[in-house]
Image (cartoon, helix red, strand yellow):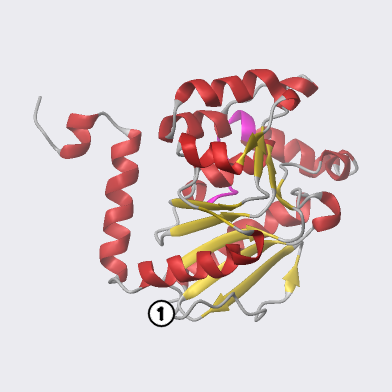
Amino acid sequence: MKNTPASPEGARDAGLRVERAGPVGWLVFDRPHRGNAMDAAMMARLPEAWAELDADPAVRVICVTGEGSAFQTGLDVAQLAKDPGALREMSRRTKRADLRLTAWHLGVAKPVVTAVNGVCAGGGLHFVADSDVVIASTRASFLDPHVSVGQVSAFETIGLARRASFTPVARMALTGAHERIGAADALRLGWVSEVVAPEELRPAAQALAERIAEHPPEVLAAVKRALWRGLETGLSEARGVPR
């Protein structure tokens, strides 16, 4: 099986690159000078980028990663402070649990593989908690600094705790910036399914996505729906067992 990284077919747009490599579409966070943090332009572009790849019949699987030393570090608070309208809109969406950042938020039907290349902090954890499969570089690390800046950690860590061990997620959320979880511990805790050398991360994600893409799209979509439904409901209800 071919093991090639995504080719740069997509142009940089609002700090977010959209690329295609065979049956695999890529979303690449491309604000390395800001830790790939989300500014107003990136947040506006994300729903369009997800929809574009989800609607493309040539794309069977979507991969997500970051450029540079960080994967995704949440909101670019400094930039948003200069854009009161965008800050108010983000606050409104957060209060109403109407976020539009990840595949799960937006109802993307295709499988999503997230490749964590570096620091994943705060709001970046959305993309880990809401992914179907996560792999990581040995340089990856995970932290949740919300409490350290007087904010409540909620959506990201709730999502992560539903799919992994509760106690380590709670410890990360409650200790804030004081504690980082490295790639090896993330693998042990089940947050990621594989850890590879940094230079192997994108090829590994591409190869995994291509293996998934060998199966019929309608079957993949049905399996994804069933798995997430099972995660989000009680066991008997998910299996369709009458009570």
Position in image of residue 8 (x %, y %) = 67, 79
Residue farthest to the right?
82
Position in image of residue 87 (x %, y %) = 78, 39
Query: Which portion, as a residue range, is magenta?
Result: 94-102
Counting other residues with Cα less than 10 Å from the Cα at mark 1, is it few (<14), some (14-19), or many (20 or more)? few
Instruction: Identify which residue, 192 or 131, lies in the foreground.
Output: 192
Assign the C terminus to one quadrant of the image. top left
Question: Which element is circle 1 on?
Answer: loop
Instruction: Identify which residue, 104 or 35, lies in the foreground.
Output: 35
Residue, x 59% and y 75% (percent of image)?
A: 6
Marker count (numbered): 1
Residue 50 against residue 133 in the figure, above or below: below
Instruction: Identify which residue, 81 or 145, lies in the foreground.
Output: 145
Residue 174 inside the magenta-drawn segment: no
Residue, x 79% and y 49% (percent of image)?
A: 35
Is residue 98 visible to us here? no
Q: Amino acid at mark 1?
A: Met
Residue 98 inside the magenta-drawn segment: yes
In the rendered image, which residue does mark 1 sit on? 1
Is residue 238 visible to us here? yes
Assign the N terminus to one quadrant of the image. bottom left
Q: Quadrant of residue 124?
A: top right
Residue, x 44% and y 28% (percent of image)?
A: 165
Residue 19 against residue 95 in the figure, above or below: below
Residue farthest to the left?
242
Residue, x 79% and y 23% (percent of image)?
A: 149
Residue 79 against residue 18 in the figure, above or below: above
